[in-house]
Image (cartoon, rainbow, N blue to C red):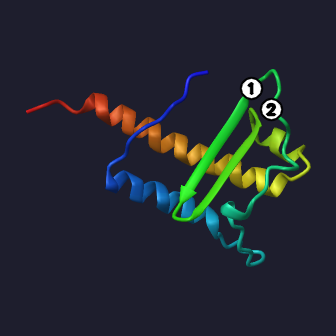
Amino acid sequence: MIRKEVFLTPAVLKECKRIIWFYSCRSNSIRVLCIYIMKEDDFKWPEPDRVGRQELEIVMGNEHISFATSKIGSLVDVQSSDDPEGLRIFYYLVQDLKCLVFSLISLHFKIKPI
């Protein structure tokens, strides 16, 4: 197994915390509903299988949480799960974090030294 670990500058870490905080409390226009990603539980999510495995570990201050589920290909996979609301939040959080990481990697290779 290849572990992907990274060391972040304080500015990038601040942005990661902001993204995670955004998913910690969201308002819905139909009903006001705070959903805490740090309070979510992956108990009802699909177990990792031969297709793949997604894991996310978050440590913020004294709080620590770890999620594991099978690969999520699309929102159809999310809707067919036993906990579509919690898995949808996880899905969008992972998509936003992936977008941030790929943007940072892209910028890293585009910057030319002076």
The disc at residue 48 is: 2
Residue 105, placed above or below residue 36: above
Q: Residue at position x 48%, y 62% from top?
A: 18
Taking depth in this image into account, of 87 and 39 the one nearest to the observer is: 39
In which quadrant is the C terminus drawn? top left
**Which residue is depicted at the point 67% across and 73% down?**
27
Q: Residue at x 75, y 59 (%)?
A: 40
Q: Are marks 2 and 1 in contact (CB under 8 Å)?
A: yes
- The quarter of the displayed image where residue 14 is located: bottom left
Location of mark 1 (residue):
52
Residue 20 position, x and y percent, is: 56, 59
Q: CA distance from mark 2 to mark 1?
A: 6 Å
Please state if 110 lies on the left or on the right of 60 as rendered.
left
Q: Amino acid at mark 1?
A: Gly
**Closer to us: 44 or 1:** 1
Secondary structure of the residue carrying tag 1 is: loop
Give amino acid for label 2.
Pro
